[in-house]
Image: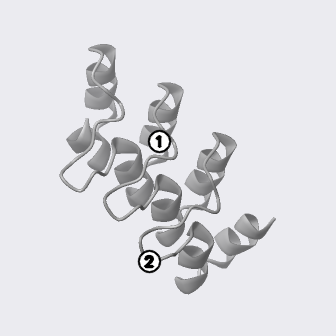
Amino acid sequence: LITAASHGQIDVLEYLISQNLDVNEFDDNRRTPLMLASRNGNIDIVQILLRNSCEVNAKDKDNMTALMYASDNGHKEIVKLLIDHGAYINEKNNKNQTALLFAYKRGHLDITKYLLK
């Protein structure tokens, strides 16, 4: 699942999910498929994972969440989708940074404004 989510392989991901693989599995850095898809901007993969009850607020080894990855990389539609599915906006990573701070620091003003609503 990690590789399929990271590389946007929708058919492979759907097959693996149909075989009851854990949608919340993680890599050596404790990044989940949702985090990787959110970081890479693959909204189709994000939607599939959310439909299959993945943990939207999981944290990696640095306490980063999928929302932080999406905010940092400027993926506004994924940010909206994650929040609609219960992502915690005010979570902080190991450096005390939030999704809002990532969006602001990277100049993603549309995401910054959205997170301030």
Instruction: Tell me the kind of residue under disc 2.
Output: Lys
Instruction: Tell me the kind of residue under disc 1.
Output: Val
Q: Up-down: is 68 above or below 113?
A: above
Q: CA distance from mark 1 to mark 2?
A: 25 Å
Q: Position of residue 75 (x, y in %)?
A: 53, 62
- Residues marked 1 and 2 touching at CB (< 8 Å): no
Q: Quadrant of residue 1?
A: top left
The figure's colour scheme reads one colour
Q: Up-down: is 77 above or below 101?
A: above
Helix or strand or loop: what does disc 2 sit on?
loop
Q: Which mark is residue 46?
A: 1
Q: Give the residue pinned by disc 2.
A: 95
Q: Residue at x 31, y 42 (%)?
A: 5
Helix or strand or loop: what does disc 1 sit on?
helix
Q: Quadrant of residue 108?
A: bottom right
Work out whether residue 32 or residue 59 is closer to the camera in this orientation and state it. Answer: 59
Q: Quadrant of the C terminus?
A: bottom right
Q: Position of residue 112 (x, y in %)?
A: 68, 74
**Which residue is the extreme one toward the left?**
28
Q: Residue at x 50, y 27 (%)?
A: 53
Q: Position of residue 68 (x, y in %)?
A: 50, 63
Q: Is residue 78 visible?
A: yes
Crowdedness near tag 2: few (<14), some (14–19) or many (≥20) residues, C-alpha within 10 Å = few
